[in-house]
Image (cartoon, rainbow, N blue to C red):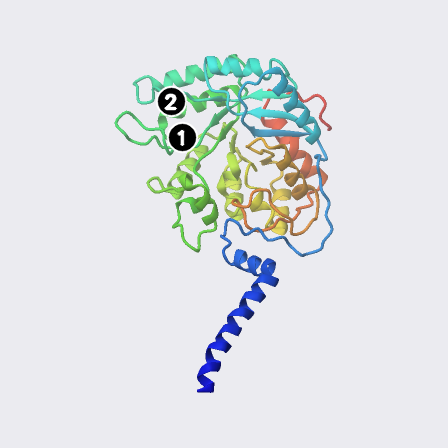
């Protein structure tokens, strides 16, 4: 009978002990519970590694950003933009969002006409009448006019190859012969073509535990792609295009999405002397291969141009740090692009100069070369 009386007393004591423990350690107890409820998106661990840091707020040499997008600004915003450029040592911005016709004229008026040493503008193809009998001739004529009105290059957005369709619904492939006359105009005037084809290959792959871009696709579900066209199909079309127009200098946006396969990109360079790349929005690929990445930049230093894409002044120093230092294991600025750390390539000065400005001066003839070092 005594044992029966003690049993509820022991239970009450146990419950009281648990209550007192929770009351006296509510902070750690709550932290434990919070930690167990973290999602992958919320998990942003801080490294405990202690290594030297060499932050680079300003590029070592003046930079030409060949991949930028800006709409016309008022005087105050334009003044702010120039101030931000000066702080970063960005000498020239190439505005790829020029449009065509009257739109192109307005963008030229808003940027290079006001600050001719700081901005140049690329035109874009108007696909509104694609499929009409005389579209090739009209598109070529529009580009001729845009060049007369101040365009110094031609930019293709990624809708070309993926979303530009004929009236009957057929997709217009990247190597469609209907565009040949446009590229002939580019060759005639010596203007470069900066072309964005496809998106990162993992966007077409299953969104599972093996997909390196899982977090980005989780946070940006609209970026998931389905075939057709497949990534491989788009890249094959692009490769046929650049081979068919050897007199046109092509700049493949985002390293042609081959930043994670430098051997393949090197093969493309070797087979096509007219192919170049910008490094816009793919720093995360280069910063994880400091040894082979450095060798690649040195070997193909004449083929790589600096570009950033989105305008965010606080993100540019990450590029300077990767290119100019030997720093180890540091954060990238956008975790959903890359959940790994970056390493510096410590590029030689002659390579830095080519990537930062010399290659752009050679390919984009409309940029004022005065003020750049030899």
Observer-nearest residue: 58 or 184? 58
5 with respect to 284 (left or right):
left
Quadrant of the rendering where the C terminus is positioned: top right
Q: x, y (%) of residue 32?
A: 55, 60
Location of residue 370 in the rendering, given as x and y in whole percent from the top left corner: 70, 21
Q: Is residue 9 left or right of residue 167?
A: right
Which residue lies under the disc numbered 2? 127
Q: Is residue 159 left or right of residue 335?
A: left
Q: Secondary structure at mark 2?
A: loop
x, y (%) of residue 130?
34, 22
Q: CA distance from mark 2 to mark 1?
A: 9 Å
In-front residue for pair 19/107: 19
Which residue in the structure is indicated by mark 1? 160
Q: Are marks 2 and 1 in contact (CB under 8 Å)?
A: yes
Crowding near the residue tagged with mark 1, few <14, some 14–19, many ≥20 C-alpha atoms within 10 Å: many
Picture quadrant of residue 324: top right
Above or below, comparing residue 7 to residue 88 in the picture: below
């Amino acid at each position: 009978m005594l044992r029966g009386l003690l049993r509820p007393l022991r239970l009450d004591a146990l419950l009281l002990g648990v209550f007192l423990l929770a009351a006296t350690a509510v902070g750690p107890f709550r932290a434990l519970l919070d930690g167990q409820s973290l999602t992958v998106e919320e998990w942003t661990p801080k490294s405990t590694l202690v290594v030297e840091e060499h932050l680079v707020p300003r590029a070592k040499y003046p930079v030409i950003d060949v991949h930028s997008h800006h709409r016309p600004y008022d005087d105050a915003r334009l003044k702010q933009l120039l101030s931000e450029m000066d702080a970063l040592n960005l000498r020239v911005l190439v505005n790829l969002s020029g449009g065509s016709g009257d739109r192109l004229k307005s963008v030229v008026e808003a940027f290079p006409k006001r600050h001719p040493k700081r901005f140049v503008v690329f035109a874009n193809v108007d696909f509104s009448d694609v499929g009409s009998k005389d579209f090739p001739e009209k598109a070529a004529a529009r580009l001729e006019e845009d060049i007369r009105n101040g365009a110094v290059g031609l930019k293709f957005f990624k809708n070309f190859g993926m979303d530009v369709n004929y009236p009957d619904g057929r997709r217009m492939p990247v190597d469609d012969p209907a565009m040949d006359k446009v590229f002939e105009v580019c060759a005639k005037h010596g203007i470069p073509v900066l072309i964005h084809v496809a998106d990162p290959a993992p966007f077409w792959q299953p969104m599972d535990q093996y997909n390196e871009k899982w977090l980005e696709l989780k946070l940006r579900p609209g970026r998931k792609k389905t075939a057709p066209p497949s990534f491989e199909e788009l890249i094959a079309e692009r490769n046929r295009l650049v081979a068919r127009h050897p007199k046109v200098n092509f700049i493949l946006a985002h390293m042609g999405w081959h930043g994670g396969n430098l051997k393949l990109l090197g093969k493309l360079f070797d087979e096509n002397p007219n192919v170049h790349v910008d490094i816009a929005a793919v720093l995360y690929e280069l910063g994880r291969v400091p040894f082979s990445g450095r060798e690649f930049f040195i070997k193909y230093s004449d083929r790589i141009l600096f570009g950033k894409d989105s305008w965010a002044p606080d993100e540019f120093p990450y590029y300077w740090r990767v290119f100019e230092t030997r720093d180890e294991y540091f954060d990238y600025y956008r975790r959903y692009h890359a959940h790994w750390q970056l390493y510096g390539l410590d590029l030689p000065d002659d390579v830095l100069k080519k990537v930062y400005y010399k290659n752009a001066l050679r390919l984009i003839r409309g940029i004022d070369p005065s003020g750049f070092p030899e």
